[in-house]
Amino acid sequence: MPYRSIEDPAKLRRVLEATLLLEADLDLSSVLRHFVEEARSMTGARYGALGVLNDDRSGLAEFITVGLSRAEEEIIGPRPAGRGILGLLIEDPRPLRLTDLGADPHSVGFPPNHPEMTSFLGVPIVVRGEVYGNLYLTNKTGWNEFTTDDEALVGALALSAGIAIENARLHEQVQKVAVYEDRDRLARDLHDTVIQRLFAVGLSLQGMSAAVSSPQLSDRLESAISELDATIRQVRSTIFELGSADFETGLRKSVVALLEELRVVVGFEVGVVFQGPVDLAISDEIGEHVLAVIRESLTNVGRHAHASRASVTLTVSGDVCRVQVTDNGRGVSGIAPSEGGLGLGNLRRRAEKLRGSFSIEGLEDGGTAVVWQVPVG
């Protein structure tokens, strides 16, 4: 049912002002509470509440109330799960106005210590075409029922709230991506700068150890080299932790786990760099292909490349997902990507299935780069 227009200029201005406040506050819990408070104030309701639907939209996962004191909320007991009139709005998400809430045949009554509630207005909140939750207002002050103007006001505010909720979700995702990218940068700095310098120092000390004639000094140098090796291992461990911290699920964690599994096959630890919103942008289907490409590529490195170093870079840029696996081995000469040797045909077919591309080429300083990329849009 479409909401009727708001003809009163003062009321329309109030809705617009509330809309600006809603869109300015990107904290989702604050957005929801502010929405209830504004709707309650505009309509003169004594009590207001907002129920957030659970994932399967069969009940309420969250219930925010306005108008009750903390003591009143505590003596009422557990929050409603979405039965009775609240359940009716879940099953049929359309505006609902009642003169006497308790007298409606769908009502299941109130728990002990619950305040008396009579007049009722319920309005769904829609986000991207799906019902996010419902707003409930009761006991209109000075009236025995809520009016059609109240319904129009709250309906307009609900549309704004849906936009604000979506903005808050997007803001949270952007913040999450920013954290990912900060960790990526730190991991790259550790890998590209700190580890390389430690290796250089270690090689220099090894050269000095071979040249000195004093056994005591040689022992001290060997001890320093061992300490450097231990430090390098610790830094590498930190890099992997940076890549996997707080990712209870998602492609990043799966890639890190896969590299740990393949360490035995490859013969050494493989570094990984993530760039862009990997967990957010890559679907489960493409993610499965990404893991298969990394497994196939690194298995080839372990069996055929005779490499001492390899790395994986997984990037999402624009609408493209790109996997690059490089090593410093002897390269793959005489085998084209279109041929089936070393499983390269599988990589090519996976890319083509997803309307992407696959290439393999030798590097100037030796080794091989495998590049596999597909669209994510």
Image (tube, rainbow, N blue to C red):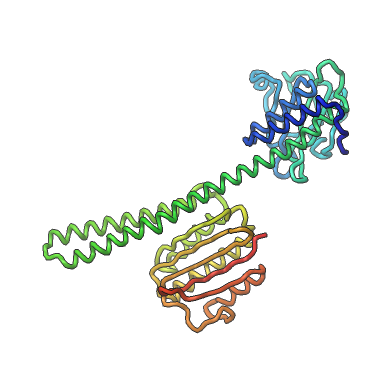
Q: Residue at x 19, y 64 (%)?
A: 209
Locate residue 166, reporting x and y percent.
69, 42
Q: Check the image and report above or below for 240 versus 354.
A: above
201 vs 311, nearest the viewer: 201
Q: Position of residue 296 (x, y in %)?
A: 53, 70
Classify the position of the C terminus by image quarter. Answer: bottom right
203 above or below 37? Answer: below
Q: Nearer the viewer, residue 371 or 259?
A: 371
State the residue at coordinates (79%, 36%). 124
Question: In percent of the image, x 87 and y 25: which residue is there?
Answer: 147
From the viewer's perspective, tell me whether residue 246 is left or right of residue 162.
left
Q: How many marks?
A: 0
Residue 252 point in image, percent of width and height: 53, 55
Tell me: residue 313, above or below residue 90: below
Q: Is residue 84 visible?
A: no
Does residue 199 appear left or right of residue 44 in this picture? left
- Image quadrant where residue 45 sits: top right
Q: Which residue is at the far bottom?
A: 334
Q: Is residue 131 visible?
A: yes
